């Protein structure tokens, strides 16, 4: 009896290859059709693809800069200024939101009824309303209704509030920067609070009891026994909250803080280079995401159980 | 009675010296805050801006003579939600159980059928006076955009999740590439792509409505997140289930449709509700690309000269509207989660 090979169409590997080939062909077709459309549309609009415009004079002003910048500088310089502004608010935001989030998360588990419920109300309000609306509220309803510069309101002489922003120990923060920072901080912290609460609750009760039976104080049990174990649960979702914060910093455009997205958007309005500007924005945010993911992965490795 | 109250107080508020201090401090802050807030709401705030513009906030510039159509839509949706909810949260009562079991197979088709019906009532045509999408504003636009986007991104997200977990190399990498790029971008950037770049990529003859482009942006965005949620569900299915189905001689597509997906989707319902809440909040970003949904409406009302400076009133009211929807859904989702675990 000869052992005849099964026909080709009964072989699942054949179909696997066919399906994948079809997918590749489809993808190429779509890219080609879209590319042709884009080419024709750009020709009709009289726009040529290319990044040469980056060397041209930007000729718009940026309200807030750390690097020196004039409207006569190039678009590259303007985008760089925007990038630094983005980084500034994202880094400060991640730092502050961690503090507020952990505080609120621990407060959710406090044995003080009042503290527990204040934290609950905070979390439920900030989690369940849009960030954009919160930014508008902070900016228009809070900052614009503050007293003007001559009548600064101050807390213990350390922090001063006025329409011109926040003054902390001689450092001045513009109202746009302060709004964005406060908005991002409190919005993201409300999510982090829930993550921290869940993480601490995931640690078995026996661990608390064991710590207590060793005679440790509650604060020491928290720091030495519970938190290291809770961190294993907390760090992965915390990473995605940091990523969200970095991405949400692009809402700066709504209140006029000149971050990278705002500057890129102005660049698009002036030059009409939609594709190039969009590629730059994508590149920037993907880099942000990669850097944050990389750093948080390192952190994740240090808090996970070291298996020997 | 009094004694119980006293022990409660001592146990929950004054069980140690620092807790007592904390309690007093918090009380002082809360009293201060509430006094100021109540004073502001009663004496300083001018709520006419909300009172006068209430229809604008809720239904936008939808013609007043056609409000009855919106009432019908509201009726249909409420009816469906009540039925669906009672199906999911079944009591252990046997008679009720039987009745509800009768409803289950009709649920999905009814929802599907109601979609064109609702759109017909809102948009008109076919015997009803047609109403331009430009007049769909405010809260109804917010809800509409969120619902349509999540409904469209649901099947796409399932396909993408299957693609990502597939053992076909190229399909897997296409899926991963799409999901990771979209998840790395801010939504405002994706809405910009949909509003400004989508027309550039399409033939000149094809002019998409602003609303459609908005939905396209939201769908592009939400599909990637949906895929990740569904993937979580797919991974929660034990391998033995797939092996058992294969041992019965089912081909792979049927294994997925009949065995894997029903279990996986059941497991991710709470996550999808969570995503819907996020999407509902995210629709506020549409106001930045020129759509007049709830947030956009509040901005255009604030631009009217007679209501200038009434930011706090408007934003608190609009925030409350968002909050009511998001919070009630998150409560519902928590309830569902409990139900699904049992």
Image (cartoon, grey):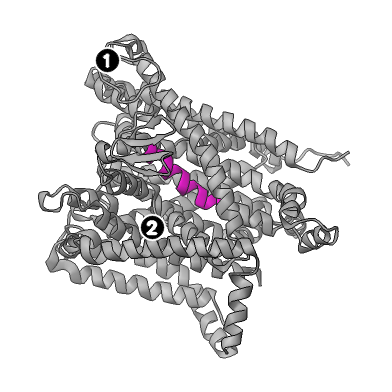
Mark 2 or 1: the one toward you:
1
Magenta part of the protein: which range?
A: A178-194
Instruction: Residue B186 in the image: state x and y as whole percent.
Output: 44, 37
**Mark 2: secondary structure:** helix
Q: Residues within 10 Å of mark 2 (few under 14, many from 20)?
A: some
Per the image, is B216 magenta? no
Please say if B11 is above or below B249: below
Quadrant of the rendering where the C terminus of chain A is positioned? top right
Camera-nearest residue between A190 and A112: A112
Magenta region, main secondary structure: helix
Instruction: Residue B31 in the image: state x and y as whole percent.
Output: 40, 65
Whether residue B131 sits left or right of residue B194 in the image: it is left
Whether residue A30 sits left or right of residue B93 in the image: it is left
Please say if A267 is above or below A193: above
Q: Residues within 10 Å of mark 1 (few under 14, many from 20)?
A: some
Which chain does the numbered disc 2 sit on? B
Q: Residue at 64% of width from left, 44% of height from top?
A: A236
**Mark 1: secondary structure:** loop
Per the image, is A181 magenta? yes
Mark 2, residue position: B147
Say if labels 2 and 1 share a chain.
Answer: no
Q: Residue at 76% of width from left, 56% of height from top?
A: A217
Mark 1, residue position: A71
Camera-nearest residue between A295 and A110: A110
Label 2, label 1: how many angstroms apart (C-alpha)? 44 Å
Instruction: Residue A42 in the image: state x and y as whole percent.
Output: 28, 21
Which chain does the numbered disc 1 sit on? A
């Amino acid at each position: 009896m000869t052992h005849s090979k099964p026909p080709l169409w009964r072989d699942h590997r054949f179909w696997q290859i066919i399906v994948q080939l079809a997918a590749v062909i489809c993808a190429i077709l779509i890219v080609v059709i879209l590319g042709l459309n884009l080419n024709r549309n750009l020709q009709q609009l009289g726009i040529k693809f290319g990044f040469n415009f980056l060397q041209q004079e930007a000729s718009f002003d940026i309200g807030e800069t750390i690097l020196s910048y004039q409207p006569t500088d190039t678009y590259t310089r303007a985008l760089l200024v925007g990038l630094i502004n983005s980084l500034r608010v994202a880094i400060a935001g991640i730092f502050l939101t961690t503090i507020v989030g952990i505080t609120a998360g621990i407060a959710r588990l406090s044995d003080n009824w009042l503290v527990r419920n204040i934290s609950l109300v905070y979390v439920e309000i900030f989690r369940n309303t849009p960030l954009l609306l919160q930014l508008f509220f902070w900016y228009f309803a809070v900052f614009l209704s503050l007293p003007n510069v001559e009548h600064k309101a101050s807390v213990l002489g350390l922090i001063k509030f006025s329409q011109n922003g926040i003054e902390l120990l001689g450092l001045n923060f513009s109202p746009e920067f302060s709004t964005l920072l406060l908005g991002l901080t409190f919005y993201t912290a409300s999510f982090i609070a829930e993550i921290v609460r869940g993480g601490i609750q995931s640690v078995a009760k026996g661990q608390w009891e064991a710590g207590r039976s060793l005679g440790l104080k509650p604060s020491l049990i928290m720091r030495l026994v519970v938190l290291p174990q809770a961190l294993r649960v907390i760090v992965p979702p915390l990473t995605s909250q940091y990523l969200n914060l970095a991405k949400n910093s692009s809402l700066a455009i709504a209140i006029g803080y000149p971050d990278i997205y705002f500057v890129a958007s102005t660049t698009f309005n002036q030059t009409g280079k939609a594709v190039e500007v969009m590629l730059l924005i994508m590149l920037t945010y993907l880099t942000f995401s990669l850097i944050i993911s990389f750093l948080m992965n390192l952190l994740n490795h240090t808090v996970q159980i070291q298996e020997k | 009675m009094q004694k119980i109250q006293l022990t409660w107080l001592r146990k929950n508020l004054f069980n140690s010296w620092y807790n007592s201090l904390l309690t007093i401090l918090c009380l002082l802050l809360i009293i201060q805050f509430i006094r100021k807030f109540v004073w502001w709401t009663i004496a300083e705030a001018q709520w006419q801006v909300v009172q006068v513009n209430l229809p604008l906030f809720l239904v936008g510039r939808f013609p007043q003579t056609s409000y009855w159509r919106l009432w019908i839509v509201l009726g249909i949706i409420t009816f469906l939600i009540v039925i669906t909810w009672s199906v999911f949260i079944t009591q252990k009562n046997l008679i009720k159980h039987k009745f509800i079991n009768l409803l289950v197979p009709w649920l999905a088709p009814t929802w599907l059928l109601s979609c064109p019906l609702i759109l017909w009532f809102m948009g008109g045509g076919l015997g009803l006076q047609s109403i331009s999408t430009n007049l769909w504003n405010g809260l109804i636009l917010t809800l509409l955009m969120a619902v349509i986007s999540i409904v469209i991104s649901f099947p796409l997200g399932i396909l993408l999740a299957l693609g990502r977990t597939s053992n076909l190399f190229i399909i897997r990498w296409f899926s991963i590439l799409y999901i990771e790029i979209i998840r790395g971008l801010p939504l405002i950037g994706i809405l910009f792509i949909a509003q400004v770049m989508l027309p550039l990529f399409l033939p000149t003859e094809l002019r998409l409505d602003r609303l459609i482009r908005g939905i396209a942006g939201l769908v592009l965005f939400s599909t990637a997140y949906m895929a990740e949620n569904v993937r979580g569900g797919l991974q929660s299915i034990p391998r033995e289930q797939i092996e058992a189905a294969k041992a019965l001689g089912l081909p792979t597509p049927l294994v997925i449709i009949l065995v894997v997906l029903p279990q996986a989707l059941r497991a991710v319902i709470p996550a999808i509700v969570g995503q819907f809440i996020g999407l509902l909040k995210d629709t506020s970003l549409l106001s930045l690309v020129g759509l007049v949904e709830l947030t956009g409406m509040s901005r255009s009302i604030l631009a009217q000269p007679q209501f200038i400076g009434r930011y706090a009133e408007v934003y608190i009211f609009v925030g409350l509207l968002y909050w009511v929807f998001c919070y009630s859904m998150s409560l519902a989702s928590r309830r569902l989660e409990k139900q699904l675990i049992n």
